[in-house]
Amino acid sequence: MKRILRTFLVGTICVTSILCILQFWYINHVISTTSRNAEDNFIFSLSTWTNIHWSSPEIWDPVRQEEIRNVMPVAVHSHNDYTRRIPLWEAIGSGCVSVEADVHFDRSDLLVGHSARGLKREDSLVAMYLEPLERLIGSRNVDVAEGGWRGVFEKVPEQTLVLLVDLKTESRQTLQELSRQLKPLRELDYLTYWNGTSRVMRPLTVVASGKVAFEDILALNPTHRDIFFDAPLASLHTPKDDWTTSPPTHAYNISNSYYASSELKDGIISLASDGDKISSPEEHDASSSQPEQAKSRGLVSRYWGSAGPKYQTSEQVM
């Protein structure tokens, strides 16, 4: 009997160890395979854009815009995008399908920066991101049929670009100002929105994170909600989920959220489960991996951070 028990314990430890090794390998594989090629033509040409600022009119020169047109999108998020030499444009030029801007509500405006110290009036969300995106999306949608749209990546025109706005100041006031500043894009029908029954995709999808209350997102126009929540990937399974309906009604879903995010070091990519012991959809959901939980809710998984010093990067995997 002791021999059988010992064999069982050794086998369990071996299986668990193998699963842990595979998960660690997978995370490192994802990180390592998203590194950019140093010989990438666009990055090389962008590095030669000397004396170019994000507000430089030269950005709109036909030659530079042609380089943007030839980019293939990749599932990469540009973390703290405003810290780059040419915010927004380096991300789009590298194919990032998501860019992040930290904003502070300051004297009736949203200023971009990581901390309140050193904010500049000229570095506003409108000037750095919203106005350039409006112009860029407009250039992609000339002569598009009513109801149709093209995204910023011409080679994959159905790809939306995500603008992740990290609110650094009090939620409600900052969120209200963000909604107000999105009005021009909203009126042009460039923003992805929830129409009360389904999500309508558009060239730009706005997601709010940071100091934003989930309840404030829910309070937005329920038939035209165009700012979505960055849901907590590590705690998607919540007592607020309703398992009495078919299909289940999840608290975080496509009507109110777009991303589900977690720090990579806390990522649970896969889980070993015993299907025979799972007796209900709720138990199955609770035992699912983070990406599986996000997928079942219609959300996009996003991991930030890195697996270790070897893989430090500012472009995060989704």
Image: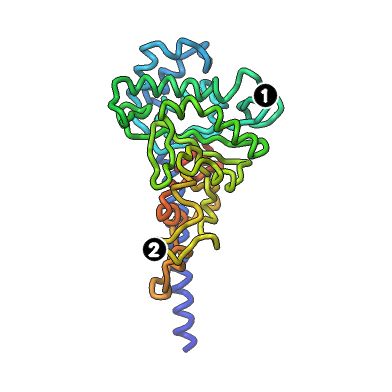
Residue sitting nearer the eye, 60 or 212: 212
Residue at the location (47% across, 57% down)? 250
Residue 166: x and y in percent read 58, 36
Q: Amino acid at mark 2?
A: Ser
Number of the label disc, if any, that sits on residue 119: 1
Residue sitting nearer the eye, 150 or 73: 150
Q: Amino acid at mark 1?
A: Leu
Asked whether residue 17 is in view, the answer is no
Left or right, 51 with reference to 284: right
Label 2 crowd bin: few (<14), some (14–19), many (20+), radius 10 Å: few
Quarter of the rendering occupied by the C terminus? top left
Residue at the location (44% across, 52% down)? 294
Residue at the location (50% across, 38% down)? 227
Residue at the location (64% across, 39% down)? 171
- Above or below for 81 versus 44: below
Q: Along the polypeptide, which appears first: circle 1 or circle 2? A: 1
Looking at the rendered structure, the secondary structure element under dot 2 is loop
